[in-house]
Structures are given as structure tokens and as C-alpha cells.
Image: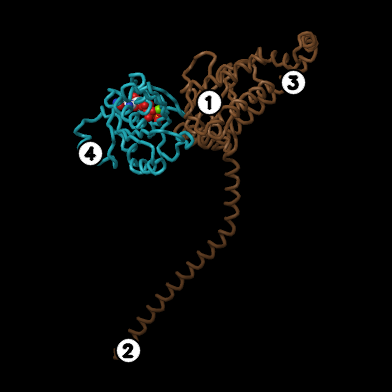
Amino acid sequence: MKKASKKIILLGHFGVGKSSLIRQFVENTFTSDYKVTIGVHILKKEVEVAPDENVSLIIWDLEGYDDIKKTRASYLLGTHGFIYVFDVTRPATFENLKNDIDYLTNQYAKTPLKIVGNKADLVTKTYLKENANMFGVQPNFFTSAKTGTKVDELFTTLAKELVK
Amino acid sequence: MTEADKLALLKDLLLTDERAYAESIHSKIKALEEVINEQKRLSQKVDPIIDERLDEFIEEIPETLGPTITEALAEQIKNSKDQVVEALYPIMGKMIKKYISQEINLLTERINQQLEDSFSANSWKRKFRSWFGGVKEEELLLSELAKISKVEQVLVIEKNSGMLIGQYAKAETIDKDMVSGMLTAIKSFVEDAFNEQSQNLELIEYELYHIHIQSFVSFYIAVAISGEYNLTFKNKIQDIIFNFTDNFLNLFDDLSQIKEEVITNELEFYFSTNEKSL
Ligand SMILES: Nc1nc2c(ncn2[C@@H]2O[C@H](COP(=O)(O)OP(=O)(O)OP(=O)(O)O)[C@@H](O)[C@H]2O)c(=O)[nH]1
Ligand SMILES: [Mg+2]
């Protein structure tokens, strides 16, 4: 059995659901009360990426920032993958999406990155389709930490890219 | 009325009017001039008064406005936790630093005390045991220290990412990958807070454990110690760490190429055998 460990980081504004996505992925639970993350919290989950091949994802859950440049740079060092989360219902969390993504792809050109619009359960699929251009960048996934929609897919897709 | 009379009258009328008009303008300008001059004069008199009042006002702010400002600040802090934390980092860093150095001073005192004690009654016992048992006195002294301080876990951690390279533990406890990440996050948080490039965090006290941290260029080694952590023990641990890195880790260019079990075995060899010899 092949086994590797990879560090991934979740970034995005306050309250977009970073911790909730991780909790849904790692523990299959969701709560609607909001506990702000202070500093960083680290969790781990093993993912099967191929028959007989597992990856241990070491997931760094950072506190939200409204300016990505304010993220403690030392936390980002040596990261194997990024997940950038925004809240589809709060424009303030995706107003600068394009800039933030450009910043990440410039600084960490070789690091895989997934862009995620979370809280998709609060809007309709039609709404997302009709407003596809609203976000400035095409997100890779529309997730719901509440219902679990696309959450496993998000992490597994990234994990597979990391071992390629 | 002749033509000439008419003309004279008209002229008179016009001229009078003109004169009156000119006069009224003149008086208005005069008045204006006066107002301006007066203002100048006034302001010369008034300005110092205003300045003085302003000074007084500023002096009084703490008393009169103090409570209001404090309240506003408290509100502000609540609402912008972020900026406040940011502003406090440097101060907090210094506080932590001061705290640690003070703790170290305290420790030093305790150790000196311990050494003094041990050179009294105990030291004679040891000397006898040493004479009869053929063991060096220092070794016996160390073995006494070893009774109270124990290596519980050793982690070799990649410095940037916080990924675990290898580890050895007396007993499997908490998740070592998560601990490695958290340690690295704490370490970089504190080091950032010190705001000094070359500062390395060397010791974390966590409940009953002391976590000794030895930094190298691309990795660091964290040793969790239960019991007392004193200078003698610290030196001993450092010696073991340097033996381990010099004789083993440094043989490899790329640490990620070493199998995890191999590192575990080596760590066990260096740390547990050395501990027995203590
Ligand atoms: N309806 C709905 N609510 C969500 C979803 N994800 C998160 N929430 C709620 O949004 C709030 C914030 O979620 P968190 O996961 O704490 O957000 P965060 O990004 O970790 O926030 P910070 O740690 O402050 O940066 C909580 O009240 C969650 O219950 C979602 O997919 N759907
Ligand atoms: Mg959070």
C-alpha cells in the first residue's frame, strides 16, 4: 500500500464555511452555529486516490481574512494544495475573487488550487447558472457544507491531483 | 427754463447722484476696511485665548472624554478584532519573550538549588556508590536527573510545511501529523511575533510537558519531555539531537527519501539507548 502525506490549506473570507467544509469532509457533520477560527486548526483525513493508494491530507484551516495578502505567509509555506472558498450568498466574499486568485497563482504557480463557491444550498441551481459571470472567475465546485454536496468530490479531486 | 438751465439741472442731478453714490460706496468700503482691520485686531487678541482654551481642552480630555473614549475603543476592539490583534502582535511577542526568559531564569535558580542540594548529603552517598560501584559520579548524577525527566516523543518535522518526516514515541498517543502541524503553526506564530528574523522558538511548555525545539535549516526536531526540564537535561538532549543529525540525518540530501520506519528506528536508538545510559 502506497501512502503519502500532503498539506492543503483552506483560504477565504470570514464565515464562508471553511471550517464547516472540513468538518463535513472529516466527520460528516454540520452545525449552524458559527465558531470563528482563531489562528489555525489542523485536521487530517486519509483519502483513497487509487486502488491500493492512499493519501493523508493534512488540512490547515486558517482564520478568515478579507485580504488574502494578510494571511500569515509562514503558514502557506510548503503547501501542496489550496482550496479558496467564497460564499455564493455574500458578494463581499467574491468581489475580489479574481485578484485573490491571481495573487495565489502568481505566488504559488505550481501549487494546485481549487476555487469553491460554498453555501450552494441557499440558492438555486438556476440562479448559479444564470449568474455564472458574477464571480469573476469560474469556480471549480459549488459546495454545501450543510448538505454535503460536492464536498467529498472537492477534496478527493484535489488529493488525486497532488499525487499525480 | 432755458436749455442751459435744463442742462445745468440735469448735470446737477446727475452729478449729485453720482457723488452720493460714490460717497455711499466709499463709506461702504471704509466700513469693510474697518471690519477687516477690526477682525485682524480682534484675532490678534483672540487667537491666544483660543490656543489656550484648546490646550486646556486637550489636557482635560482624559477626565471629561476619557470614559467615552474608552467605551468607544472597547466597541472598536470588539468590531475589529483583526486589526487589534495585528497591532498587538509585536507587544505580545515581547511579552512572551520576557515571560520565557524569566521562566528560564527561574529554572536556572531551581537547578542551581538542586545541584547544591545534591552536592550535600546526597553527594556523599553518590560518592560512595561511585567508589564502590566503579561508576563515574557524574553519570550517577545524571541518572538521578533522568529519573525525573523523560523523553516521551521525538518528532522530526519539515520546517516550512510542518509535515512530519519521522518520529519516535514511547507510547502512541495523539495524532502525530496534527501535532507536527500545530507545533509548526505555533512556532511560526511566535517567531513572527518576535519580529526578529533569526529568533527561533526553543521551548514550549504544555501542561506537564516541555517541548524542546531544535531548529535546523530545512527541518526541526521537537522533543516532548515529561518531568523536569533543566539545563543539564537540555544540554544532554541537545547532544543527542546533534549526534542523531550528524551521524544519521546529514547522510541524506533529501529527507523525504528516508523511510519513516528507518527514522523511527534511528530515533529510538539514539534517544532510548542514550536515556538508559543516563
Ligand atoms: N446554509 C449553509 N450554511 C453554512 C454552510 N457552510 C457554513 N455555513 C454556516 O456559515 C457559518 C460560518 O461557517 P464556518 O465554517 O465557521 O466559516 P469559516 O470560513 O471557517 O469562518 P472563519 O473561521 O471565521 O474564517 C456557520 O454558521 C455555518 O453554519 C453551507 O454550506 N450552507
Ligand atoms: Mg473557520
Residue B149 position (above or below residue A60): above
User: How far is the residue under mark 3 from the one under mark 1?
Assistant: 31 Å
Marks 3/1 same chain: yes
Please name the color used to draw chain A.
cyan
User: How far is the residue under mark 3 from the one under mark 2?
Assistant: 127 Å
Please name the color used to draw chain B.
brown
- Residue A114 falls in image quadrant: top left
Label placed on residue B112? 3
Pointer 3 residue Cβ closer than 8 Å to ligand 1? no
Kind of element beneath mark 1: strand
Label placed on residue B156? 1
Nearest to N terminus: mark 3 or mark 2: 2
Label placed on residue B5? 2
On screen, residue B120 versus residue B58, left or right, reads right
Q: Which residue is mark 4?
A: A131
Q: Crowding at label 2, few (<14), some or many (≥20) Cα neighbours within 10 Å?
A: few
Question: For the residues carrying marks 3 and 2, which lies nearer the camera in this image?
Answer: 3
Q: Amino acid at mark 3?
A: Asn
Kind of element beneath mark 3: helix
Given the image, what chain letter belongs to the residue carrying mark 2?
B
Q: Amino acid at mark 4?
A: Asn
Q: Amino acid at mark 2?
A: Asp
Q: Amino acid at mark 1?
A: Val
Q: State the residue in front, B246 or B56.
A: B246
Q: Crowding at label 1, few (<14), some or many (≥20) Cα neighbours within 10 Å?
A: many
